[in-house]
Image (spheres, rainbow, N blue to C red):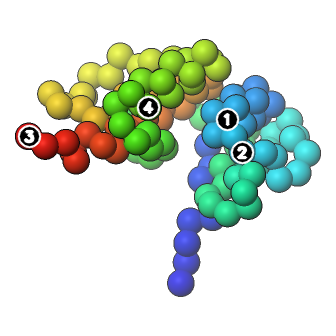
Amino acid sequence: MLRVGSVVLGVSDVPRAAAFWTEALGDVPREEIEEDWVVLVPTEGTGTHLSLGLTETPLQAHPRIHLDLYAGDAAHQAAEVERLVSLGAQIVDWDLYPDDADFVVLADPDGNRFCIIDTGHHRRPA
């Protein structure tokens, strides 16, 4: 059986992206950070790796693949959005938000889109 081992993001500056994502996720480089490649791994040793590879491919306004990062509730989501913005992320003026969105779209310093999900959103009583 296969499993996802690593998600790969194309970035224009690998050291800058590694600095952002190590702070954002608490991951560490598996090996020395190169100018064109690094693999970040969870500090506890298990979980999906995040690989950052140098690319010149242009960004997509509505990327086909992105990361969803889970927060436990709305307060945790808001705190994480604030923390990630302080690390260099930007809030994206997303034109596809549903009326009752449980996510906030951010972009990392390279412009890669990712979402912070309020996982408690749909568990609330109506």
Tell me the kind of residue under disc 3.
Ala
Tell me the kind of residue under disc 4.
His
Q: Percent x, y for residue 10? A: 64, 39
Task: Return the residue at label 2.
Answer: 27
Q: Are marks 4 and 1 in contact (CB under 8 Å)?
A: no
- Which of the two discs, 1 and 2, sits closer to the camera? 2
Counting residues from the start of the chain, the first of labels 3 and 4 encountered is 4
Task: Return the residue at label 4.
Answer: 76
Q: Percent x, y for residue 125? A: 13, 43
For residue 45, which numbered disc appears in the image? Answer: none
Counting residues from the start of the chain, the first of labels 1 and 2 encountered is 1
Q: Dot 2, how many residues are within 10 Å of its Cα: few (below 14), some (14-19), or many (20+)?
A: some
Q: Is residue 61 visible to the viewer in this orientation of the structure?
A: no
Q: Dot 3, how many residues are within 10 Å of its Cα: few (below 14), some (14-19), or many (20+)?
A: few
Task: Return the residue at label 1.
Answer: 21
- Which of the two discs, 1 and 3, sits closer to the camera? 3
Front one among 78 and 116: 78
Q: Secondary structure at mark 2?
A: loop
For residue 126, which numbered disc appears in the image? Answer: 3
The residue drawn where x is 81% and y is 40% is 36
Q: Are marks 1 and 2 in contact (CB under 8 Å)?
A: yes
The residue drawn where x is 62% and y is 60% is 47
Quadrant assignment for the C terminus: top left
Task: Left or right? Give the position of 39 relative to 4.
Answer: right
Q: Percent x, y for residue 118? A: 35, 38
Q: Secondary structure at mark 4?
A: helix
